[in-house]
Amino acid sequence: MFVRDHMVSPAITVTPDIPFQDALKIMQENHFRRLPVVDKKGKLVGIVSERDLLYASPSPATTLSVWELTYVLSKIQVEELMTKQVVTTTPDTPIEDAASLMVENKVGGLPVVDEANRPVGIITDRDIFKAFVEMVGGGQPGLRLTLSVPHGKGVLAGLSRAITDLGGYIVSFGSFPIPDKPDQDGLVVKVQDISRSQLVDTLEGLGDHVVDAREV
């Protein structure tokens, strides 16, 4: 699963010289929270978020008249508010690497650029959440197992074989570290067409510890 599979494309962009109020209107009309900023050649030069633009909006306590406000605000351009050091990704980036970039840089979205640094899309935390739901089989019925298994080769093959031998079908699979048990791996598996008691007994017999098993 790659960024290209979940990004919003094409990317709606603005130029640095656009008034910030116009950029805010574009966001609100399209239900976006950020816009890539491009130069005349279409290359990425920054990004502006809804928060950046709202911070530039006047306070209700201002003493300026409505005419003065209109004049002042019309002079503020996106270039003055945008972030110039932009964290980007590419269409071929694995979705989990894009998610890691967001977490590491504490951002909620990434412009997706081509080889010439031109925006071809944008991927946000909401898109990542949707991808995560798909990867773990969210919304699909089945038996969801949380397991603690020995760290080593062949463990997954044994687990898959046991489920298959019982007539089960693996809907989704994921792994996670167990910090206080370096010799163990955490697994989350969703299966169908198999009974809870039958599978739990079989896996415990293989040496896998079933932390949780529930029908969803």
Image: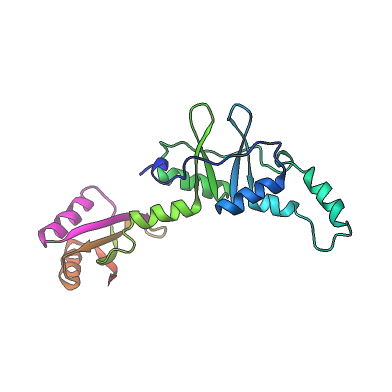
Q: Nearer the viewer, residue 83 or 174?
A: 83
Residue 14 can be seen, yes or no: yes
Q: Quadrant of residue 63?
A: bottom right
Q: Which residue appears at 57% of the width and 49% of the height?
A: 107
> What color scheme is it?
rainbow
Q: Position of residue 96 (x, y in %)?
A: 42, 46
Q: Is residue 160 magenta?
A: yes
Q: Which residues are magenta?
A: 150-177
- Does residue 183 appear in this view? no
Please give left or right for residue 12 compared with residue 150 in the image.
Answer: right
Q: Quadrant of residue 191?
A: bottom left
In the shown orientation, is residue 66 left or right of residue 202? right
User: Looking at the figure, which quarter contains the C terminus?
Assistant: bottom left
Q: In the image, what residue occupies the spot 80% across and 63% down?
A: 60
User: Is residue 144 found left or right of 62 in the rendered image?
Assistant: left
Q: Residue at x 70, y 41 (%)?
A: 78
Residue 68 spot, x, y in % from top left: 87, 51
Instruction: Please name the residue shown 38% across and 42% down the image.
Output: 2
Q: Position of residue 101 (x, y in %)?
A: 51, 44
